[in-house]
Image (cartoon, helix red, strand yellow):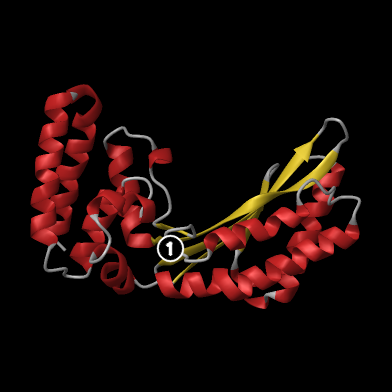
Amino acid sequence: MNEKLNFVNDYITAFITHNFPEFSRFKIKINEDALYFHNNTNGYKHEIFVGLGELTYPDHKIVNGGFHCWVGVNFVENLLIELISKHDLHLNQLHPTIWFNEFTISNFSSIWDSFKQFKDYDLSTNKEILDKLCNHYKEIINQHFIPFWDIYSNIQYINDEIIDIVPEEEVNNYFPGMGNFKKLIIMKLCSNSNYNDYKNYLVTVAENAVIVDPVKYKPYANLFNELTEKLENL
């Protein structure tokens, strides 16, 4: 990692940890394209991804690269990770339980667009812009990221406000990566009255998928079968 990128990474990290003392509990990971602030507490994971880009043409500079924020439900993700590994599927097919996006946050687009003001500035040589970016992150974390974590770190809320309301064809907008399996697990944990109907629906989906392409879908069907067995024993 080059000196310019190190400077920007260290500067943003110092700013955020100074302004959010609670982030002292977070694991901080620095790599070539982002800073990660990650916390795991009370059964839920919280993460912020601060994206940074390194441009080498026509000038060498470090630029803002967007953000991600998410909530992970430990029980849901740990169970799926175990089964994905067992059935020889790829872990990159599993994403965090709930993303901060246009479906989970009503004003997501305006929040995302608010970072365009920093586009193309070299953060390593323009301290005024770097300070402005840091203060903007402070505002977004306070007003949006932390409230998002608070709201979605509650599986009953997820059950009531997403699972019971969102049409099936839109589930993966809220639960990206194996969204149907995540939905089923949360329904079981919350004693959702529609759990058995949804499980039976997925049985039919799995059976039909295996008929269409057994090589591709048999591992998923096997995972699903074992998942339902585990859920029945809860």
Q: Position of 203 compared to 108: left or right? A: left
Look at the image and tell me in which quarter the C terminus lies.
bottom left
Look at the image and tell me in which quarter the N terminus lies.
top right
Task: Tell me where residue 164 appears, x and y as whole percent.
Answer: 23, 66
Q: Of helix, strand and loop, which one carries label 1?
A: loop
Does residue 64 sit above or below 192 in this rendering? above
Q: Residue at x 64, y 69 (%)?
A: 140
Task: Tell me where residue 208 appears, x and y as whole percent.
Answer: 11, 33
Q: Position of 27 compared to 178: left or right? A: right
Number of other residues with Cα within 10 Å of mark 1, as a class: few under 14, some 14 to 19, many 20 or more: some
Q: Residue at x 38, y 40 (%)?
A: 93
Task: Tell me where residue 5 appears, x and y as whole percent.
Answer: 80, 46
Residue 111 sits in quarter: bottom right
Is residue 226 among what the camera can see?
A: yes
Q: Amino acid at mark 1?
A: Thr
Q: Position of 113 compared to 107: left or right? A: right
Residue under circle 1? 104
Q: Residue at x 68, y 43 (%)?
A: 33
